[in-house]
Amino acid sequence: MIRNLCDNGYASAVLISIDAHWFLKKGKAVVAWSEEYPQVANRPYSYMITDAVPALLKAGFSKKEIDTFLIDNPRSYFSERWHA
């Protein structure tokens, strides 16, 4: 899906993120997972860098494209909204 967006000129509109599926409740980590996806219980916040980025590179995305998704587009998005 991301490749299709990029190939059709929408790379500057792509923002990607992950959800670590856990949160703090009264100072303790609580894992929010489903039986359908039990692997998310072990997904740390570093997952984007340690797993998702290498998967994107392996799928043929360039470092420049990944930087666009993870750096340039979020900077632009939040910059426009905070300074409007």
Image (cartoon, grey):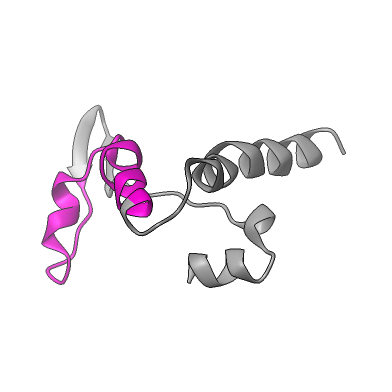
Residue at 37% in and 53% down: 56
Residue at 35% in and 59% down: 59
Q: Where's residue 69, x and y in %?
A: 55, 47
Q: Residue furthest top?
A: 27
Left or right: residue 50 compared with residue 62: left
- The answer to whether 14 is drawn above or below residue 63 in the figure is below
Q: Based on the displayed image, in which of its 4 quarters is residue 24 positioned?
A: top left
Q: Where's residue 70, x and y in %?
A: 52, 41
- Nearest the eye: 64 or 36: 64
Left or right: residue 31 compared with residue 64: left
Residue at 67% in and 57% down: 13
Q: Which residues are magenta?
A: 31-57
Left or right: residue 39 compared with residue 62: left
- The answer to whether 54 is drawn above or below residue 75 in the figure is below
- Nearest the eye: 65 or 24: 65
Q: Is residue 32 one of those drawn in magenta?
A: yes
Q: Where's residue 57, x and y in %?
A: 37, 49
- Nearest the eye: 1 or 24: 1
Q: Is residue 45 one of those drawn in magenta?
A: yes
